[in-house]
Image: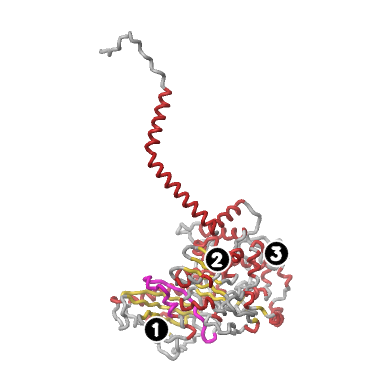
């Protein structure tokens, strides 16, 4: 595919692409290196069928309203690959008069273009930091025919994005869960549960960065480990297009799964894929070689103390291919197979991809959108997340009941919020420590998930799981990711303390926390809070008005009362007799 002989299967960066806006043709690819089509040149406008939406993703809706910005997006795999492609695009606009070389097709006052990196690895922030500098230099040339800098970018990134860079914390550069918690506060746990339930979640905002960052940060929280984040598949099997019959496209593990009994959009998650019991019987000998412990090994000792810090185990970082999920799993069976088999992850969705929301081959999605036409189709989503206002809109009352946070959940969320908000006003302390930092937040969510999974196999599991919400646990057990995880054995779970990390007796603080959460999140609470704010403002304004109108009268009355009391305190005056001569002034 690459004329210069590079092995595309080994390089992290696949292509450098320039997308421009043509006044007649709209968004189109103007340059690609290496060429997107093997038999075409670098300046070809042709696109692979799988990537036909690339121009609309790289140059998103409303790009003309911003001088410069960035967007993250995902593309489906090509050539039978099972992993999706991760795109980072930096788009800018420049005044046409400032160009040194103005081409004939430039007829508008401004020129809009984006420089895009298509990569095999989700290094969003790291790629963005490098790409912004190159995009700025590319526009400063004021001659878009100078493409040597773009070729140098391709070689530089493939030379630097390897080795320790793909294993360290640089994978999460620019994706801070602290910002997510500061924005959504306690509701961040509701977002976490929505994804575990594989619901149709659509974050919305007016500009691209807030929406794609929210989706990307949620991924880093759910896929805590670097190795987990690097093997993200994003449900790529159904990413390209759905077959007309509604059947899921075949994959290497399709023999282990039964197709859905119904292909209508109303099919529930539990009907979509059912594990074939015979496949588990066939995999049993393999499991016996890997795990020698039986189901009784999952029962932990009740004397294990409860901790709010993750417990490290030897060999915890090792990953092995999952027998059913096909993902590289650790000893705990993580990452969960959430973004697989038709559950899509789209940090940004173009308007041209609108059909994916109602596609029968798509079980669910986490798809960010900015176009107003998406907002008018709320019935296609289970939850609409208004990022700027930090609100989660859920129409289904049953789903709201399932996602209702328990007292232990509120303690956990409040624990996160308090640690994140501490010292955030101090620029020297903000985010520098372990507690309240990005890695600490991801570790807390990992502990939450580990404890939830460990509680499933405890002899008193019914009582322990009530702290997570019985309706939520029941709904989670019928999801695809849970059934895949439950079909295997995970002996390392014996070292995890069962039960909610914040289980315990109720207290007055819990009542206050529940009341505060209800006021902030329920519709009645919001109306009550708004009414209280309005009333308090009215009282203050009325008090000022009354004070101004009767201020003079009050002052006069106060003065009169003071004079009267002072008069009562003085002795009575003596009346002189009439016969007495008037007193004359004595002169010296």
Does residue 214 lie above or below 406 as drawn?
A: below
Residue 471 shows up from this direction: yes
Q: CA distance from mark 3 to mark 1?
A: 59 Å
Kindly state the secondary structure of the residue where label 1 is placed. Answer: strand
Does residue 93 lie above or below 527 as drawn?
A: below
- Quickly name the residue at label 1: 31
Of circles 3 and 2, the one toward us is 2
In the picture, the disc for residue 394 is 2
Q: Nearer the viewer, residue 540 or 460?
A: 540
Q: Nearer the viewer, residue 330 or 357?
A: 357
Verify CB contact (< 8 Å) between mark 1 and mark 2. Answer: no
- Farthest residue toward the top? 579
Of circles 3 and 1, the one toward us is 3
Left or right position of 544 against 179: left
Residue 330 shows up from this direction: no
- Farthest residue toward the left? 588
- Quickly name the residue at label 3: 462
Colouring mode (rainbow / by chain / secondary structure / one colour): secondary structure
Q: CA distance from mark 1 to mark 2?
A: 43 Å
Span highlighted in magenta in the image: 55-80
Left or right position of 298 against 130: right
79 inside magenta stretch: yes
């Amino acid at each position: 595919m690459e004329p210069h002989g590079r092995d595309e299967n080994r390089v992290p960066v696949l292509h450098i692409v320039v997308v421009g806006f043509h006044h007649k043709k709209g968004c189109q690819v103007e340059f690609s290196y290496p060429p997107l089509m093997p038999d075409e040149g670098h300046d070809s406008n042709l696109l692979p069928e799988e990537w036909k939406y690339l121009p609309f993703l790289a140059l998103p809706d409303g790009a003309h309203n911003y001088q410069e910005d960035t967007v993250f997006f995902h593309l489906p795999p090509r050539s039978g690959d099972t992993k999706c492609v991760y795109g980072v695009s930096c788009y800018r606009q420049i005044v046409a008069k400032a160009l040194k070389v103005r081409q004939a097709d430039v007829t508008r006052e401004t020129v809009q273009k984006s420089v895009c990196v298509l990569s095999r690895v989700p290094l969003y922030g790291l790629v963005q930091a490098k790409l912004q500098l190159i995009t700025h230099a590319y526009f400063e040339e004021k001659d878009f025919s100078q493409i040597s800098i773009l070729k140098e970018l391709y070689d530089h990134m493939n030379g630097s994005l390897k080795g320790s860079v793909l294993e360290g914390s640089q994978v999460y550069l620019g994706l801070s869960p602290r910002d997510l918690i500061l924005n959504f506060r306690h509701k961040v746990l509701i977002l976490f549960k929505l994804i575990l339930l594989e619901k149709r979640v659509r974050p919305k905002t007016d500009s691209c960065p807030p929406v794609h960052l929210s989706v990307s940060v949620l991924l880093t929280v759910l896929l805590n480990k670097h190795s987990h984040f690097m093997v993200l598949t994003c449900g790529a099997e159904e990413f390209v297009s759905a077959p007309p019959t509604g059947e899921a496209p075949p994959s290497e593990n399709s023999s282990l799964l039964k197709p859905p009994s119904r292909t209508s959009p109303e099919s529930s998650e539990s009907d979509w894929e059912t594990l074939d019991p015979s496949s588990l019987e066939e995999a049993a000998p393999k499991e016996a070689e890997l795990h020698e412990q039986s189901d009784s090994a999952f029962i932990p000792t009740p004397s294990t103390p409860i901790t709010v810090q993750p417990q490290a185990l030897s060999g915890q970082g090792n990953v092995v291919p999952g027998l059913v999920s096909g993902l590289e799993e650790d000893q705990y069976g993580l990452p969960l197979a959430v973004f697989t088999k038709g559950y899509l992850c789209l940090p940004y969705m173009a308007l041209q991809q609108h059909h994916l929301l109602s596609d029968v081959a798509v079980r669910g999605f986490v798809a960010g959108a900015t176009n107003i036409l998406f907002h008018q189709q709320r019935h296609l989503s289970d939850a609409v997340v208004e990022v700027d206002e930090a609100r989660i809109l859920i129409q289904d009352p049953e789903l709201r009941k399932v996602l209702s946070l328990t007292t232990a959940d509120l303690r956990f969320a409040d624990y996160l919020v308090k640690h994140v908000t501490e010292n955030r006003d101090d620029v020297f302390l903000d985010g520098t420590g372990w507690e309240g930092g990005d890695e600490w937040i991801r570790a807390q969510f990992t502990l939450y998930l580990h404890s939830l999974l460990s509680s499933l196999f405890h002899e008193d599991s019914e009582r322990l799981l009530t702290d997570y919400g019985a309706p939520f646990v029941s709904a989670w057990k019928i999801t695809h990711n849970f059934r895949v995880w439950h079909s295997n054995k995970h002996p390392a779970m014996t070292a995890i303390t069962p039960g909610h990390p914040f289980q315990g007796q109720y207290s007055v603080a819990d009542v206050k926390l529940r009341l505060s959460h209800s006021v902030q999140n329920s519709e009645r609470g919001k109306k009550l809070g708004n009414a209280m704010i309005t009333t308090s403002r009215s009282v203050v304004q009325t008090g000022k008005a009354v004070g101004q109108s009767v201020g003079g009268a009050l002052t006069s009355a106060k003065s009169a009362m003071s004079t009267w009391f002072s008069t009562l305190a003085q002795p009575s005056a003596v009346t002189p007799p009439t016969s007495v001569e008037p007193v004359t002034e004595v002169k010296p």
